[in-house]
Image: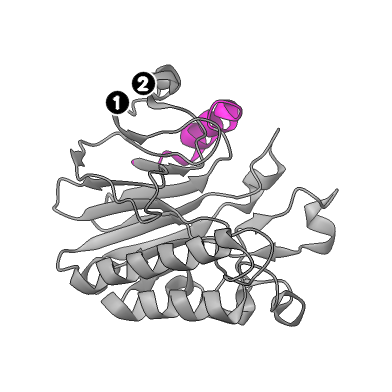
Amino acid sequence: MPTTKIASWNINSVRARIEIVEQFLRTEQPDILCLQETKVEDGTFPHAPFEKLGYVHRLLAGQRMHHGVAILSRIPLGEHGRHDWQDNGEARHVGARLPNGVRLENVYVPAGGDIPDPAANPKFAQKLAFVERMTRWSEDLREPTLIVGDFNIAPLESDVWSHKQLLNVVSHTPVEVEALTRMQAAHGWVDLGRHFFPAPARLHTWWSYRSPDWTVNDRGRRLDHMWASPEVAKTAVAHRVHEDCRNWLKPSDHVPLVTEFDW
């Protein structure tokens, strides 16, 4: 039975890593690819490689240097606007409506800096406020929706290589975990990663560039997520994390996620 495959990947500059994006599209053949941290303005987005591979439908929210998100698709997309959950104009969200009526939301949550104290670190305060705005939006959501992207939070103890050592490290602090848990409860979101790979199974999507060989110590975190409304989650039939992409030439520090749906 044919399925619809949706991929999500923080690519850390789509122009710098267009070769591995093309490699992934050729080998995995997703129907839709959601990219975060594209680091390119809409006017200079590299359209040609996607056009050549059949991804002729594109929705962009670009920005110079940092941020930026994009949805590339082989199936038609209805534009569904952008949310400024950062409340400062940063390009961190783009939404689409799929032919079956499902909303697809692609989001790049701020990293939050290094100090996990909103009083001492404005970037951390902005991150918490971003998640709070997403939570308020989730409360009012009445349509079948899939939200994907780099949430920059690893919520479960088994989502990081060492819960004890990362408790005070931004991305796994109790205040961030609590904020993301409230967001999940606000709409009854189903975490598709943990739906298919229940905790405490190892499930990582990011490894720091600081490690000379990420495979040796495997100090990963699950920062990238796919969450679905309950009715959408019922149609999910498979989920994979493509760790092998972390070994590709000039890789991103994140790897792609792919979920297949019975559509």
In this orientation, which residue lies closer to the viewer: 210 or 261? 210
Q: Is residue 24 magenta?
A: yes
Q: Is residue 252 above or below residue 152?
A: above
**Disc 1, disc 2: CB below 8 Å?**
yes
The residue sitting at 57% across, 57% down in the picture is 111
Within 10 Å of disc 1 (Cα), the crowding (few <14, some 14-19, many 20+) is: some
**Residue farthest toward the front in the current orientation of the protein:** 119
User: How far from the left and from the top, in percent, is residue 121?
Assistant: 62, 63
- Is the stretch drawn in magenta largely helix, strand or loop? helix
Within 10 Å of disc 2 (Cα), the crowding (few <14, some 14-19, many 20+) is: some
Name which quarter of the figure residue 16 lies in.
top right
User: How far from the left and from the top, in percent, is residue 17?
Assistant: 60, 30
The residue sitting at 43% across, 66% down in the picture is 129
Name which quarter of the figure residue 32 lies in.
top left
Magenta segment boundaries in residue numbering: 14-31
Q: Residue beneath label 2, please?
A: 51
State the quadrant of the C terminus. Answer: bottom left
The residue sitting at 38% across, 20% down in the picture is 43
Could you tell me which secondary element the residue under label 2 belongs to?
helix
Question: In the rendered view, does 40 fall on the left or right side of 187?
Answer: right
Task: Count the labels in the image.
Answer: 2
| Residue type at the position of mark 1 | Val
**Numbered circle sitting on residue 56:** 1
User: How far from the left and from the top, in percent, is residue 94?
Assistant: 32, 45
Marks 1 and 2, the one that precedes in the sequence: 2
